[in-house]
Amino acid sequence: VERLFKDEATEEKGERARMASFVGAMAIADLVKTTLGPKGMDKILQSTGRGRSVTVTNDGATILKSLHIDNAAAKVLVEISKVQDDEVGDGTTSVVVLAGELLREAEKLIATKIHPMTIISGYRMAAECARNALLERVMDNKEDAEKFRSDLMKIAKTTLSSKILSQDKEHFAKLAVDAVMRLKGSTNLESIQIIKKPGGSLMDSFLDEGFILDKKIGVGQPKRIENANILVANTAMDTDKVKIYGARVRVDSMSRVAEIEGAEKDKMREKVQKIIAHGINCFVNRQLIYNFPEELFADAGILAIEHADFDGIERLALVTGGEIASTFDNPESVKLGHCKLIEEIMIGEDKLIHFSGVEMGQACTIVLRGASFHVLDEAERSLHDALCVLSQTVNDSRVLLGGGWPEMVMAKAVDELARKTPGKKSHAIDAFSRALLTIPTTIADNAGLDSAELISQLRAEHHKEGSTAGIDVISGSVGDMSERGICEAFKVKQAVLLSATEAAEMILRVDEIITCAPRRREDRM
Amino acid sequence: MASPAVQVAPRAVSSKTESYVDNKRKDDIRMSNITSARSVADAVRTSLGPKGMDKMISTASGEVIITNDGATILNKMEVLQPAAKMLVELSKSQDVVAGDGTTTVVVIAGALLKQCQTLLHSGIHPTLVSDSLHKASLKAVEILAAMAVPVELSDRDSLVKSASTSLNSKVVSQYSSLLAPIAVDSVLSVVDPHKPDLVDLRDVKIVKKLGGTVDDTELVKGLVFDKKVSHSAGGPTRVENAKIAVIQFQISPPKTDIEQSIVVSDYTQMDRILKEERNYILSMIKKIKATGCNVLLIQKSILRDAVTDLSLHYLAKAKILVVKDVERDDIEFITKTLNCLPISNIEHFRAEKLGYADLVEEVSIGDGKVVKITGIKDVGRTTTVLVRGSNQLVLDEAERSLHDALCVVRCLVNKKFLIAGGGAPEIELSRQLGAWAKVLQGMESYCIRSFAEALEVIPYTLAENAGLNPIAIVTELRNRHAQGEINAGINVRKGQITNILEENVVQPLLVSTSAITLATECVRMILKIDDIVTVR
């Protein structure tokens, strides 16, 4: 037969292709499996790039997204974890573990000559049934503000308990809930700013109502301003250059050069005066403010902050209700930002500028303190997860119990479905319920507990109607989850269930992998 | 709400009979992490204490550093193993938080890891160890706080004592009687009475100058520039009743931002241009002179020459002392000290923006020269310390030691408590935690006992480095503490155990507490790692 592909392209078919994707997906799932649950372990990510930087993390999405992966199926799993991260922020490990388990079960079924399509339709039925089972058991405390807040606290604590912040989860849960409550239902986490400052301990972290900019105030300018009118700008403060390439000045005497220099200076001065004419007392520029304008601002008693980073500028404009300006000819059309007080504060060894009483009441800043950058980075990731989950929960206030409880509920429902369903599909449904059980199993295993014993106890508990039993990892036994205050957001669980099933389905459908010939790169070296 | 979960913990002796998990690889990684982190700790162990030894580090670029400062040693070691790197980070954090105790924190972390290794071998789950360590560290901080003695900032003696404790373990220890008061005075003079808890060490400038000995180090109430006065054109080098201007513009022929070229078509034009240049500069200098200014500090410029030979010449004629190439970063410090404003345009050159000082002079020190500005009117809350040393190595180490001493004083300003040194707090912690462990039940008690044992490493190492018999010393120390002498510690100079508070060996509470909490946090992090993944 003539070759269909180019020289270096490869093709794997049928059984081999399926095996390759199964193996890849399961390897990925096993890699992150140990990070699951409150007693999950962390991983060191050692970069092979320059500096060989080290990251210590427990976050599934972070681990997966930095891996080198060549296996197509494994890439699909990385992808779903990313999507989970974007959508709900938490459960990034669970989704990969569940998908991996579904595939592991599928592999066994295929070995017993069940067609992949049958497995897929079985999985679909099972997923639908599991979702309905969860829906029946959700709790919704939206009406009762008091209870809702305590729900949020519980969710935050549950999320944080598997992270580095677990020891101080009470403190951070409160931080996160306060921050999210300020957002009043918006899921825009932009206005929550997280600043990391090494030094102190995690307990020293705090929530600040306002905005903090990590910059310095210009020399000789006021360090404290009340009722500030802020102009946020992105403009070059040096002379407005003639931007035509090759433009040059041709003169015949030194005094003319001095005149032109003077003219350039005047241009700067004019610009500064235009800016001052806006009636502001604080000017923040994304680009540099040079010495000359800085002095002019100082003379006018205006606080000028230069070289604020892009992110900082946008946020500042957002929270103070201003707009980023770059031309200053029409003072009326420029929207100024406002805040009650600007002052210089000191955190650790660094001086920062604090804007309080800002226009947008939702805005707040969380200042994280910690022993080292590793701790801070990981703390930021954990807090971000918690914030994501909470902001989702504020919109969709349905809440479930945690600690393996949802999985047990789902497994029970799916089991019943399997018994009712005739035909080969029932094997697949059965397999689905087994895969669900691996989540509590893994949580128990990671905690060094006897998972087989615990899971069987748990199953017996759940045979009773309306049981609230789950794994209490701290005491290492089966316990009442509602009593322990372990809660999870329904949205997270649903996303885990659905996207894991979809990913497994997608990988199952594959029967051929074609690797294209890599594009040749010419050696320019 | 987490409390119910914690309360049930003690009764949890679960049916841990036949769990089987294949954890071999994970254990291997954890063990290799612990081992490499411990070897880092061992490397700096010998530099602990007043009789600790120094390390000579030869960097890749051929530079040689001799130091006793844990943070510096670790920083230059260039370790690659990720867990070992975390210990380096740990010492950096201690440097940021407290500035001193950078070796102590690493040594404690090493000892804790050693204990953890034993605990892990006996099959205790790492997270359990980690949680217990956290509890123990909280308790330890409590105990330390109870031991501490409050100190007032007006009590200069106590501050000097603690600064000299820190200096005693450095290369420059013989100068501690000189450097300690300098450190205390310079920190106290920058404390803002409105914000009594904050000290910005950036307000203390350390200027190093080779030559002389550390003895010649002095505190200057004013400014010192490590620069020469520009007197190539014969300008003054000493000005009394100085009126000082800090300028950010250049006294040189004009230059535009747009590319410029002057077209000269004949000989007479050339003459004219030269004359114009002269007039241009002369008019600038006249304006400067008109305000009565007689000292110019000129910021470095990358765009064009800050001063030219011609302008220097005219400035010299006008009897103006010129210091050029002042860095932009220093401008804030300078203006704060001189209580003046920077001037960035000749048009704005007004008398009210000038600073005043009694004397500006160039002083030759060793083979170099520095410019000193003293007797500043309305001096800002800043100080300058001029550090001297006979060679670069001593000079650098003196600077590092002085920085540590400054940090120690700063810690005391932040948290006004002192604690005994010489291993006393550690042995007391060890004793009290040991007693506490006996009250507790289960794994927790076991882990906390190990924590208590690990803390003994500090007195042990102190004694060992001083050439004493560590076991004899530590056991005696333990004995004395058991009899209620909580301030008994190792007196390294006498080689015996005395009441360390009476010996004036004291350190800030913040140094001890942050060493314990940071070390525990780092160890907990290492314990929780079960895999190293190589990524892009």
Image: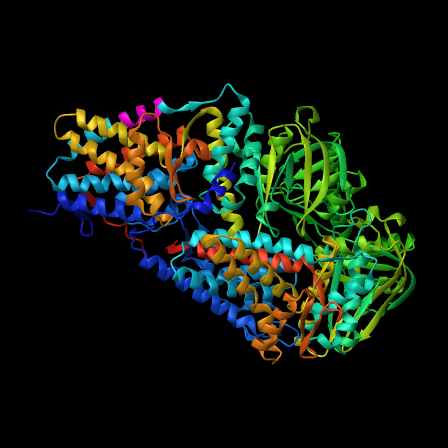
Left or right: A336 as drawn, with respect to A72: right
Residue B268: x and y in percent read: 78, 58
Q: Does the magenta stretch include residue B219?
A: no
Number of marks present in the image shown: 0
Residue A31, above or below A460: below
Q: Which residue is drawn at 59% across and 53% down?
A: B139
Residue A451, above or below B327: above
Q: Which of A294 and A19 is in front in this view?
A: A19
Q: Furthest-top residue in view? A: A143
Residue A507: x and y in percent read: 23, 38
Residue A10, above or below A123: below
Left or right: B226 as drawn, with respect to B126: right
Residue A236: x and y in percent read: 64, 41
Q: Residue at x 49, y 42 (%)?
A: B7
In which quarter of the view is residue B472 placed?
Answer: bottom right
Q: Give the range drawn in magenta.
A: A129-136
| Dominant SS in magenta | helix
Q: What colour scheme was applied to this rendering of the protein?
A: rainbow
Q: Furthest-left residue in view? A: A1
Residue A480: x and y in percent read: 40, 34
Q: Quadrant of the C terminus of chain A?
A: bottom left
Q: Which of B252 and B289 is in front in this view?
A: B289
Q: Can residue A221 be seen in this view?
A: yes
Q: Which residue is drawn at 67% across and 57% down?
A: B510
Q: Is residue A373 visible?
A: no
Q: Which of B21 and B43 is in front in this view?
A: B21
Q: Residue at x 51, y 55 (%)?
A: B133
Left or right: B489 as drawn, with respect to A82: right
